[in-house]
Image: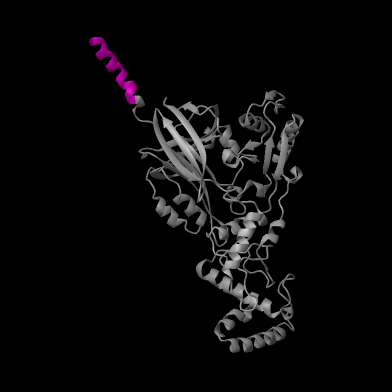
Amino acid sequence: MRHLDFYRLFRCAKKKTIAIITMAALFWAIDTSTLGAPPSTPSTHSPSQLTPAQIFQYIGEQKVKTAAEDGNTSSSAKTDKTYSPILLEPSGRPWCVRFSPSTRIEDLKEPFKGNLKRFHAAITRAGIRIVITTTYRPEERSYLMYYSTQIARNKESAVTVPSWQGVNIDWGHRDRIGFKANLVKAKSAARDMMFGYGIGSMPVSKPGRSSHNYSQAIDMQLSNFVGKTVLDAQDKSRKIKNFIDLKSVGASYGVIWYGPEDRVHWSLDGN
Amino acid sequence: MKILIALLFLAAPTRMLHATPPSIGLWEDVIVVDDDTLQLISHQHFIFTNQKLVAPTIFTALKDYGGEIDAFCCIEVQNTTSLSALEMERKFSHDHDFVQRFSHIHGLKYLYEARLANREIWNDKMLLLKGNRNDGNDIPFSAPVIAGQLGFSEIADNHFSSADGHEIQLKTDVSKKKQGQQLIHQFMIEHQRTTFTVPILGD
């Protein structure tokens, strides 16, 4: 299907009437070109089953691809600019419940999992209250968190966000007929997502640049710790007077506190 | 009178020894990622300093946990040709976050390319922080630094002595500004205060 280069053909057809004629020609071309040629990959949708909206979608993708090829020739394993022409879903709050983060210690990886289990057991025994908010965070979620924040904070245009494999999101809220982006809707939806993730004014790291993506970090709120006695990793009783004492006990188990700028974040290496 | 002159004469070398306070600054472990492809472009270490470096220098990074300081040994500057932050921003303009971050580091005049010191001199904190990371899974890091190799990896309170005997105090505060949260690092070296600010890293 790609060798026909529908986008270039479409680019020539600027007027509405010509566009309609072009569309008819495209349908005819798709049907005839696929009679004897199966799709190149099993996951590719059969072009003969494409709706007009999907064809516009494809044209838009080709536009993005052409723009990317003009300025940059590199490619990525994670960012996928040549995915098959399927319908994308506009950004917005419903995305916040997808690619959910885990709150289970079991979803972490060794050696951090074992370290944390021992620390968790020690502080629980001591009567310290723990609320876990995140352990493993999928990269897809980091991608959604990062770009919703970038768009909401005017640091990125909704139409230039790179795609991410497996996340069929339409950041631009494109019109299904004219394939035009609606930047007002896009920003409002991104802001909704940012609030949905509870980001507030906090900075967000790029996907793949958080220890949560590697199952080596936990976000947990600890309370009711002052005056408690906790056993450290060397089985020594430690009286907890303040948070620094907890940091020290955590470190003995190989659970390192990040610091006051991110009070809930603990990881294998302190990052 | 003679005794006084003799005492002044004896004290002079000691005063000279303490005359120049150690360079202080900021270590930026930067992962430059292309905005279009999200691919790693470069992994760089930079050190911002308050003084011009005249010779290759070893630095110890410090992190104030609010009542306890951890020290990470060590990072070094080999090439003492200072860099222009603006030029670095231009060089890595494909990473919008990098440009944003670098343009919001205030209070330190000089910038140098740095690298992790020879692993043989790393202390336990540095081994923990950088020992198991490679470019593929590395996470950006930032911490204040002081010239010299400090003799501790963890110290209670905010006071310590530098490698050449200066009394140092380090305090880090989190400030909330309109543009986002930032860290305010403040060094006090024998009553001389140096303050610099840096945006908080994302998680």
Q: Does B10 appear in magenta?
A: yes
Q: Quadrant of residue B66?
A: top right
Q: Quadrant of residue A220?
A: top right
What is the total number of numbered labels drawn onto the structure image? 0
Q: How is the image coloured?
A: one colour
Q: Please tell me which residue is depicted at 53% across the width and 60% down the height of the picture.
A: A154
Q: Quadrant of residue A97?
A: bottom right
In the rendered image of this protein, does residue A141 appear above or below residue B201? below
Give the camera-side residue of B42 and B198. B198
Q: Position of residue A69 (x, y in %)?
A: 54, 70
Q: Position of residue A118 (x, y in %)?
A: 74, 34
- Can residue B23 be seen? no
- Point out the image quarter for the N terminus of chain A: bottom right
Give the side of residue B186 with respect to residue A239, left or right: left
Spot the residue most to the left.
B1
- Can residue A241 be seen? yes
In the rendered image of this protein, does residue A173 appear above or below residue A216? below
Give the side of residue A260 with respect to residue B48, left or right: right
In the rendered image of this protein, does residue A271 appear above or below residue A170? above
- Point out the image quarter for the C terminus of chain A: top right
Q: Does A41 appear in magenta?
A: no
Q: Position of residue A49 (x, y in %)?
A: 74, 79
Q: Which residues are magenta?
A: B1-16
Secondary structure character of the magenta stretch overall: helix
Q: Please tell me which residue is depicted at 68% across the width and 24% down the height of the picture.
A: A238
Q: Position of residue B63 (x, y in %)?
A: 53, 35
Q: Please tell me which residue is depicted at 45% across the width and 46% down the height of the picture.
A: B105
